[in-house]
Each structure stands twice: as C-alpha cells, then as structure tokens.
Amino acid sequence: MDIEIQRKDKGLLVSIKGRMDAIMAVEFDRAFDKLIQEGGKNFVLDMSGLEYVSSAGLRSVLGAYKKIKNAGGNFLLCGLGGVVKEVFEISGFASIFQVFDTPDTALAQL
C-alpha cells in the first residue's frame, strides 16, 4: 500500500493505493497518528486507488475517524469503488462516514 499526502487549502488529501491488509493497516495508523500530532484536523481519504481492504483496514479507518473527530476535525472519504465499496457497504461502514465521489467534491465540504 502506498500513502500520498497533499496539503490543500482546507485540509489534507490522503490517497491510499494498493491493498490495506493487517500489515499495511499498521502503516496507515502510524501515518495518521503522525499527521494528527503535527496538527492535522481536516482530512479527505481518497480510496480510489485501493484494491482491497481487510477487517484490520476497516478498523484502522474507523480508528483514524474517531481520533480526528475527538480532536474536533473532519474526516471524509472519497473514491470508494469495486470490492472496497462492497466491503464498506456490507460492513455498514458506508453509513458511518460521509462519502463523496471525487477528492474535489469532498474537499469542498471541509
């Protein structure tokens, strides 16, 4: 899994690509913890490049969401597609998050 971070006017755009399994979920956790410690509060997580997400990946996304919300920030998702979208819908996670089609539409909501 690759993680790319772009600073935008209203917040951070975090793009993840590849597979988010138990091992990569730990990397995701570290990246978000660091961004939060650096003062990040408004995030858009672009999942358009994600091919697979495991239950550990779902827990990591939910954990990041909770930390950011508790810090008074915003955490929006975009680009859910294919198998990843199915996993989010079947697990009920799609109803927890605000989900947008594109990064631009999500960033406009921050």
Image (cartoon, grey):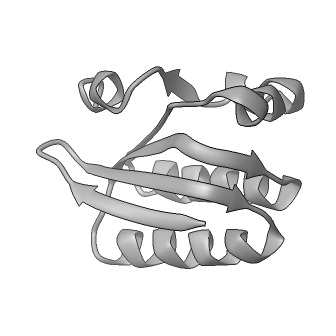
Q: Residue at x 48, y 68 (%)?
A: 32
Q: Is residue 74 shown above or below 109?
A: below
Residue 1 picture location, percent across and down: 61, 66
Q: Is residue 64 left or right of residue 32?
A: right
Q: Is residue 106 above or below residue 28?
A: above
Name which quarter of the figure residue 82 lies in: top right
Residue 96 appears left or right of 98: right
Q: Is residue 88 above or below residue 30?
A: above
Q: Quadrant of residue 92?
A: top right
- Relative to 9, residue 25 above or below: below
Residue 68 percent across, percent down from the top left = 47, 55
Q: Where in the figure is residue 5, as x and y percent of width and height? A: 33, 62
The C terminus: image quadrant: top left
Left or right of 110? Residue 96 is right
Q: Look at 57% across and 50% down and name the residue there.
A: 65
Which residue is found at the position 69% from the left and 46% from the top? 51
- In the image, residue 45 lies at what x, y percent? 46, 45
Identify which residue is drawn at 64% across, 28% down: 81
Count of numbered tags:
0
Q: Quadrant of residue 26?
A: bottom right
Q: Nearer the viewer, residue 108 or 46?
A: 46
